[in-house]
């Protein structure tokens, strides 16, 4: 089936907006879970950018990159959530500022 | 034998090098062997050289030995050369022989002290430098020796450096003599630029040829050299360092500040006497300085309670006599007095050292007393030395030398009578303070009991020096010195006969001893009553502080300098460097504040940085 | 077709904005799933159907579900929601919003510099992606599998509870 004739720039702009929203989420939230969530948003936006660009040129490379990003995101979520569980057990809080021993 | 002359300064220098490099690892015996041994070998060699020189059949006047070419630049070619004539021979003999005796004495004196090998390294270096000074054939080499003895003086005054006061005294000595050294250096520059050479004999010939008597160049050069001599010999106005230099060990005081280094100025003027003859005004100034100094120092010696300070002021005073002699043209009389003074002043210092050592480092005369029974050898030798200092007639060499000076002063062309009167008054004062010292120290009730009695190594030098003191007048030195120095001027002998003058001098000496007996042995209350009066106590305080020179120099020179240095401390260059350090500190503080350990803070920083980078990419 | 794109884009942006501003973790996750689904629709529209499928199955279906599981394991109750409300004061949005606007502005500016040409391209199916993966990108595929292994081991080790560990271990495992 033929693809839509949306200009690449619109897709990239959308990716940019989603990325920036994720960034805002990282900066604003204090709860670790929400921060990880926002990081996922950013990863997704980056993948969107790749796919849009690949589609523009009609090559599979963009989608291949997205697959890799997806893989990495999965691994990262696994390890990250395990760390969240450790943090919650040790500090009994999900406050990001509680883990600040590397100051100075 | 004369060719071995170079060994005389080289042996002590070798001793210094050995002790400096490996002395720390040697035991006391080995260090003493090197130190005393090199000094003794040098003295022995000096004797042989002197013997060869004196008895040589060809009536050798001068022996020169050039070791190597030191500097070779265009017209400036001072060599490392030695010049031996009657004058330098006399100086060499006195320096090596008295030096050896003092080394022997110091072996026992410094036995208990730390830094034993360091001490002998310094004294060996001193003897080497002093010999270089007196044997130099050009003024640059002489200046090298001059600076060398100044350095050793500093090192040895501050030998017990753990006490800060000793370091201060050493610094004071070095800085005050530095003023003189600078004047002398400028004098050397002047001489070289005007006359084109620094070789002494050559210099004297060119000076007589090119400079008329009283020319400004000669006067300037003579003033500058006089400045150097005044510094090293502790005369007015640079005499303030010598009393404080007594902070060093007593052998040092004997060697450097009595017998040898302080007479370097006298030697310099005698060596360059042609220059002073070309500037009669300056020569008169030498005599006036000598007379003034001998009176000032004599009065100060009357009020001191530290036995070494009495001897220090006495040294200043006696060198004043030598300057007086130089000033009236009696060159050989000055050197004769130098020799006799070296013997009896070294004797007095070594004796004082023996007393100090025995009484556990007690310096205050008024805490001594009754020692003539406890330390007999020390007492008798000290008495002989004091008699020579007071110029007791006929049996002491001090009488002959001082008498010669006074005689020549009387016959001097300018103001002879005044100079003679000053010298005579000085002789009286000398007698008084000398025997004041003897009576207070050795007689009266014993305030302290003597501890460990001195051994042979202390007694032997004392005895030898005592014998030399008594016999020194009969060596015929002045006639011997006429081989190198102009003979005593015979110009204006007045009607008053020589015998009359001698009698007056003898009377003054004995009178002084008698006055001292009255005041310090018979009835000590009189002095107390005198000093209790207003005038008496003010005079005593004034004389005790050396006529207020320290106070004057402190107000006039030291304090303004310190104020200026402090004000200049935060000048613009300093501020510039401070800006650098302050900037570094501020940036450190700022950067360490960014390490908060908060993850959100880091995330914010990364985001902001990304924004900035993208902005740059957009704009450029 | 363009309409679908624009509507999905709007829904994605809106639901993402809602996701980052919720106080309840599960609510935020659910909003995020909505966002992911709309992004998948966009993928489908621009001719990447395989990726759209993967987005739904893996991203929204696996990763987000893991998130939900962990959040439920953490047992965040009303207390946590109360804390979030306290932390999310209005003033806290100010700085990041400025930063965000700056970044978006720069991005749009750069994007606007070039022309907006449209190019029609056909959709790229799984076959082409497969050929690409096992052709030029085969090494990356192997590396990705090692990465997943590392993630697995790390998650297993890090996720362990203290009481499970038999003997006390030192640091540095």
Image (tube, coloured by chain):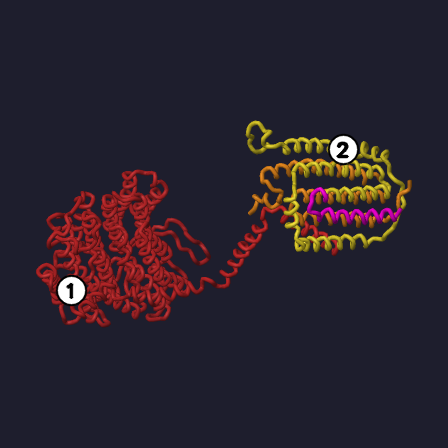
Chain colours: A orange, B red, C yellow
Q: Looking at this view, is B234 or A84 the one in front?
A: A84
Q: Looking at this view, is C168 or B447 the one in front?
A: C168
Residue B21 drawn at (x, y percent): 37, 42
Q: Is residue B314 above or below residue A30?
A: below
Q: Residue at x 32, y 68 (%)?
A: B278
| Numbered mark located on residue B428 in the image | 1
Question: Element at badge 2?
Answer: helix
Question: Element at badge 1?
Answer: helix
What chain is tagged by disc 2?
C
Q: Give the quarter of the image for residue B506.
A: bottom left
Q: Give the quarter of the image for residue C61.
A: top right
Q: In the picture provided, is C157 more to the left or to the right than B258?
A: right
Q: Which secondary structure is most common in the magenta stretch?
A: helix
User: Which stretch is magenta?
Assistant: C1-28
Q: Quadrant of the N terminus of chain B?
A: top left
Q: Give the quarter of the image for residue A36.
A: top right
Dot 1 crowding, Cα within 10 Å, few <14, some 14–19, many 20+:
many
Q: Residue at x 41, y 51 (%)?
A: B69
Q: Is residue B371 above or below residue B391?
A: above
Tag 2 residue: C141
Q: Looking at this view, is B553 or C169 the one in front?
A: C169
Q: Looking at this view, is B571 or C38 the one in front?
A: C38
Q: Please indicate, yes or no, whether residue B332 appears anywhere in the rendered image.
A: no
């Amino acid at each position: 089936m033929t693809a839509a004739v949306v200009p690449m720039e619109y897709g990239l702009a959308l990716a940019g907006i989603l990325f920036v929203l994720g960034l805002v989420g990282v900066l604003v939230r204090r709860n670790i879970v929400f921060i990880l969530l926002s990081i996922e948003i950013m990863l997704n936006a980056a993948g969107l950018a790749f796919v849009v660009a690949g589609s523009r040129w009609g090559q599979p490379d963009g989608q291949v990159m997205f697959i890799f990003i997806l893989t990495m995101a999965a691994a990262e979520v696994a390890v990250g959530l395990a760390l969240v569980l450790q943090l919650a057990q040790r500090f009994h809080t999900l406050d990001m500022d509680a883990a600040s021993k590397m100051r100075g | 034998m004369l060719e071995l002359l170079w060994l005389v300064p080289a042996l002590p220098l070798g001793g210094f090098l050995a002790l400096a490099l490996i002395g720390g690892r040697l035991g006391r015996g080995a260090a003493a062997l090197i130190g005393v041994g090199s000094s003794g070998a040098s003295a022995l060699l000096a004797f042989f050289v002197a013997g060869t020189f004196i008895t040589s059949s060809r009536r050798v006047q001068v022996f020169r030995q050039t070791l190597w070419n030191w500097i070779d630049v265009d017209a400036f070619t001072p060599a490392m050369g030695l010049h031996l004539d009657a004058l330098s021979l006399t100086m060499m003999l006195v320096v090596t022989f008295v030096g050896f005796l003092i080394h022997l004495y110091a072996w026992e004196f410094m036995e208990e002290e730390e830094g034993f090998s360091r001490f002998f390294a310094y004294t060996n270096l001193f003897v080497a430098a002093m010999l270089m000074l007196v044997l130099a054939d050009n003024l640059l080499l002489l200046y090298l020796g001059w600076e060398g003895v100044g350095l050793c003086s500093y090192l040895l005054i501050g030998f017990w450096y753990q006490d800060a006061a000793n370091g201060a005294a050493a610094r004071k000595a070095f800085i005050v003599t530095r003023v003189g050294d600078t004047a002398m250096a400028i004098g050397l520059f002047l001489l070289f630029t005007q006359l084109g050479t620094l070789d002494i004999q050559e210099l004297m010939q060119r000076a007589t040829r090119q400079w008329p008597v009283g020319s400004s160049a000669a006067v300037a050069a003579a003033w500058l050299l006089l400045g150097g001599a005044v510094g090293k010999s502790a005369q007015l106005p640079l005499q303030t360092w010598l009393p404080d230099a007594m902070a060093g060990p007593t052998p040092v005081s004997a060697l450097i500040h009595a017998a040898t280094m302080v007479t370097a100025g006298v030697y310099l003027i005698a060596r360059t006497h042609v220059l002073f003859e070309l500037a009669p005004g300056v020569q008169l100034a030498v005599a006036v300085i000598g007379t003034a100094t001998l009176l000032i120092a004599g009065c100060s010696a009357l009020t001191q309670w530290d036995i070494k300070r009495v001897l220090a002021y006495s040294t200043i005073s006696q060198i004043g006599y030598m300057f007086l002699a130089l000033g009236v043209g009696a060159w050989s009389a000055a050197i004769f007095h130098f020799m006799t003074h070296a013997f009896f002043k070294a004797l007095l210092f070594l004796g004082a050292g023996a007393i100090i050592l025995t009484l556990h480092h007690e310096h205050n005369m008024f805490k001594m007393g009754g020692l003539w029974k406890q330390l007999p050898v020390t007492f008798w030798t000290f008495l002989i030395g004091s008699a020579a200092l007071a110029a007791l007639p006929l049996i002491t060499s001090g009488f002959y030398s001082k008498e010669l000076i006074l005689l020549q002063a009387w016959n001097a062309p300018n103001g002879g009578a005044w100079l003679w009167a000053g010298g005579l008054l000085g002789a009286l004062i000398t007698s008084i303070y000398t025997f004041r010292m003897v009576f207070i120290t050795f007689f009266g009730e014993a305030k302290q009991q003597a501890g460990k009695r001195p051994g042979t190594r202390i007694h032997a030098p004392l005895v030898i020096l005592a014998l030399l003191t008594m016999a020194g007048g009969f060596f015929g030195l002045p006639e011997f010195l006429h081989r190198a120095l102009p003979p005593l001027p015979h110009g204006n002998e007045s009607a008053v006969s020589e015998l009359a003058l001698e009698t007056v001098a003898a009377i003054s000496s004995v009178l002084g001893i008698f006055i001292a007996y009255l005041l310090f042995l018979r009835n000590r209350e009189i002095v107390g009553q005198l000093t209790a009066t207003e005038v008496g106590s003010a005079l005593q305080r004034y004389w005790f502080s050396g006529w207020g020179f320290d106070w004057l120099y402190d107000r006039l020179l030291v304090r303004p300098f310190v104020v200026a240095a402090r004000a200049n401390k935060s000048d613009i260059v300093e501020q510039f460097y401070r800006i650098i350090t302050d900037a570094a500190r501020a940036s450190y503080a700022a950067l360490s504040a960014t390490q908060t350990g908060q993850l959100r803070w880091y995330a914010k920083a990364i985001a902001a940085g990304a924004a900035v980078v993208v902005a740059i990419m957009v704009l450029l | 077709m363009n309409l679908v794109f624009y509507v999905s884009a709007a829904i994605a942006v809106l639901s993402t904005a809602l996701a980052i501003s919720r106080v309840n973790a599960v609510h935020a996750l659910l909003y995020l799933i909505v966002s992911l689904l709309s992004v998948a629709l966009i993928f489908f529209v621009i001719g990447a159907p395989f990726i759209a499928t993967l987005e739904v199955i893996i991203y929204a279906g696996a990763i987000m579900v893991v998130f939900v599981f962990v959040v439920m394991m953490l047992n965040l109750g009303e207390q946590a929601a109360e804390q979030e409300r306290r932390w999310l004061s209005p003033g806290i949005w100010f700085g990041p919003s400025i930063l965000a606007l700056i970044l978006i502005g720069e991005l749009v500016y750069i994007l606007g510099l070039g022309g907006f040409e449209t190019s029609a391209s056909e959709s790229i199916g799984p076959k082409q992606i497969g050929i690409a993966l096992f052709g030029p990108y085969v090494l990356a595929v192997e590396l990705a599998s090692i990465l997943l292994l590392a993630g697995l081991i790390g998650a297993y080790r890090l996720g362990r509870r203290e009481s499970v560990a038999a003997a006390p271990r030192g640091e540095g495992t």
